[in-house]
Amino acid sequence: MAVEIGGIGQSVKRKEDARFIRGKGKYVDDVKLPGMLYLDIARSPLAHARIKNIDTSKALKIPGVVAVITGKDLVPLNLHWMPTLMSDKQMVLPTDTVLYQAQEVAAVVATERYIAADGVDAIEVDYEPLPVVVDPIKALQPGATLVREDREQKDNHIWHWEVGDKAGTDKAFKDAEVVVKQDLYIPRIHVSSIETCGIVASFDKVEGKLTVWMTTQAPHAIRTVIALVAGHLGLAEHKIRVISPDIGGGFGGKVPVYPGYVLAIGASVLTGAPVKWIEDRAENIQADSFARDYHISAELAAKKDGTMQALRVKTIADHGAFDAAANPSKYPAGLFHIITGSYPFQKSFVEVDGAYTNKPPGGIAYRCSFRVTEAAFTIERLVDVLALELKKDPAELRMQNFIPPTAFPYTSSLGWEYDSGDYGRALRLAMDKIGYAELRKEQAAKRAKGELMGIGISSFTEIVGAGPSKNFDILGIKMFDSAEIRVHPTGKVMVRIGVKSQGQGHETTFGQIVAEELGIPVADIAVEEGDTDTAPYGLGTYASRSTPVAGGATAIAARKIREKAKLIAAHLLEADPDDVEWKDYKFQVKGVPTKSKTMQEVAFAAYTNHPQGMEAGLEAVDYYDPPNLTFPFGSYICVVDIDRGTGEVKIRRFVAVDDCGTIINPMIVEGQIHGGLTMGLAPALYEQITYDEQGNIQGGTFMDYLLPTAMETPSWETAKTTTPSPHHPIGAKGVGESATVGAPAAIANAVVDALAHLGVRHIDIPITPWKVQKILKEHGAAE
Ligand code: MCN
Ligand code: CUM
């Protein structure tokens, strides 16, 4: 029975794949409207410069060029600046100064895409170079080059944020038997979705209605932002329709509002024609928001026997020229204070300072759940540093310290209430699966022969599902989410939700939740997202929040339907509602299984034979404000071999044990973990964006920004434990980012473990062959 329904726990094949594998997905660039114009953007070659003059005359002479837009043109419309999600503001186009390389400088609108590009080439900008600051530590020093002249505050400090018990933590460190300290740099990286960002904006002058198709993870929030930013131009929220069609990967990079979107909307309002802007690959990697860029200094205090006591962390966050991060308003450093991880620290204190530099806006996302990757990497690296200091096995040290399963719900010393967990079980399973004890023996034998092999563990705790509205809002909009379910007379179902898949498989998994709750086969349930004219208001998909929040809304909306359906069933069965129960996906008269009604029969009756006095129809809406976040976790173990000649790190095995509570679709979750692990491998060994002293991007193309391909990616081995969330309607936690959060520390720990006997204690990621070879040479261990 359950298999036919395709309810919770079934590996139902992804419904959306029917169109994706046939090349029939509908992406923004597939939208083609009559009379559509194309927009392209001129970008700054310099990281900091005064704009002396922009000469657009040659561009305007090109046949097919309709308009050229500069910052000065936007001033009368008050559109030259826009607010960011972090209550900062960002230039749409500069009027006098550019602040980073690849910043938007002017836009060309033309009848064809290539004509627009020619127009961009023909724009002549006279720049006067200004001093550049790319290092946030230097940027915060007195006398540093000022990045943001527009601000009242005349330095590069954006904000200071701290949490925890400073005095108590300082005292714990003073009294501690053992203190380890580690500085870590988590470099700037960039998501590389298959599809770049883009928009088609179409303004209907007669109706005063704006329709936009855009690559956004949060269509409703974007509609509100457009209404707030452009309300003075007559764009009211009921006359704005944002459609987020199929998206070819988002990973957080499609949360922010980029100037290109605003320019395309502005151009459509000005010309009255539809305007398309599709970013090219170089623009995507050079100018869109970046992730990480955290300079961390972390200390851990412990007893000699290994008992962890206190944690103290100081961080400088490089946000580039505009603080355009997509964090909940209250938390400028995201949920970085999950940094206490899986361990019951008595005292902790964390502080973060944000800095402006002449780099593109940073602090966005890379499958990160709001800075959780940085936190998990730091604590899991630090635990290994402590293990080395105490000469303890890192698995044993973790087992000794884990928050015990009996302690949940557990409130961390930085204030988060972890809903549920069993960390020891996950680590034991990973150790059994990989054969930990045997591997340690093999390592010792290899070491004796001079061969380099390492084993690395990461037992991370994630925090996802923003959020309880008491803690979470973006620009004041509370982070709830929603579902609307309509059961049609023939028992077919339409589900609309406020989140927006970018490849996660929502059309399947949200259908499965409804199938489970209503006993209607998942094949009969359509799930729609991403159209603000039809879907209920929601905050979108990021921070692995869809299942924790919209998933809760979906289950509750379905349960509301079931409550009404029960009354109709009782009417049909001529029974008292109290004598009717929901069993085996049917309504039955208690104790009389032969007297039953299916949900389909009830649905038909809801429109044809409902009890007198009851409203007709069978539908429900729920706006779900979760009581807490969910705290998925996992234990990953990685085995590496290192080539002493080339310094190359080879991942021999990687076992990932994840726990995301109740699993809706095991196949989809495994897919999420495979993808997530690969995106965890990427920054651990390959990806990094750096800038030279003049602010020139190094690694702005795939020639030197190294994405792992199938060649570099090992065969991931996955397993699971299931510790349901006690507060989620179906016990599910989010999972979309877990593997990216957990994997880098396991890999880095494995490499350091392979070299620890040489005296190596830490290597900053990405751990490139070049870095390893240098270390081997320094220690006389190179071949
Ligand atoms: N799921 C499940 N059982 C659970 C948890 C999740 O079956 N206990 C399913 C969900 O129903 C959903 C998928 O797994 O189909 C991911 O669910 P969830 O963890 O709720 O995450 P979201 O749907 O909110 O997706 C966001 C998350 C984030 S923040 C990034 S970044 C990321 C990720 O998802 N970007 C992705 N995975 C991605 N996968 C693809 N293909 N493309 C992206 O851009
Ligand atoms: Cu932090 S990347 Mo996801 O939250 O879209």
Image (cartoon, rainbow, N blue to C red):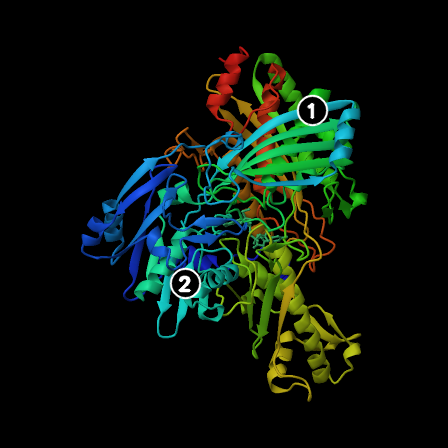
As drawn, the residue found furthest toward the bottom would be: 612
Q: Amino acid under label 1?
A: Val
Residue 345 in sight from this viewpoint: no
Q: Mark 1 and mark 2: span between their CA atoms?
A: 53 Å
- Say few, some or many: other residues with alpha carbon within 10 Å of mark 2 (under 14 / 14 to 19 / 20 or more): many
Determine whether the residue tagged by mark 2 lies in a helix, strand or loop.
strand
Q: Position of residue 727 (x, y in %)?
A: 73, 56
| Mark number, residue 420 | none
Q: In this view, does 394 lie to the left or right of 578?
A: left
Q: Where is residue 541 in the image (x, y as percent from the top left)?
A: 55, 55
Tell me which residue sits at (48%, 37%) in the image. 189
- Say few, some or many: other residues with alpha carbon within 10 Å of mark 1 (under 14 / 14 to 19 / 20 or more): some
Between disc 1 and disc 2, whose residue precedes? 1
Tell me which residue sits at (68%, 56%) in the image. 470
Which residue is label 1 attached to? 180
Tell me which residue sits at (36%, 46%) in the image. 104
Considering the image in quadrants, where does the N terminus appear? bottom right
Which residue is label 2 attached to? 212
Q: Which of 75 and 514 is in front in this view?
A: 75
Q: Amino acid under label 2?
A: Val
Q: Assess mark 1: CB under 8 A from ligand 2? A: no
Q: Position of residue 290 (x, y in %)?
A: 48, 41
Q: How many marks?
A: 2
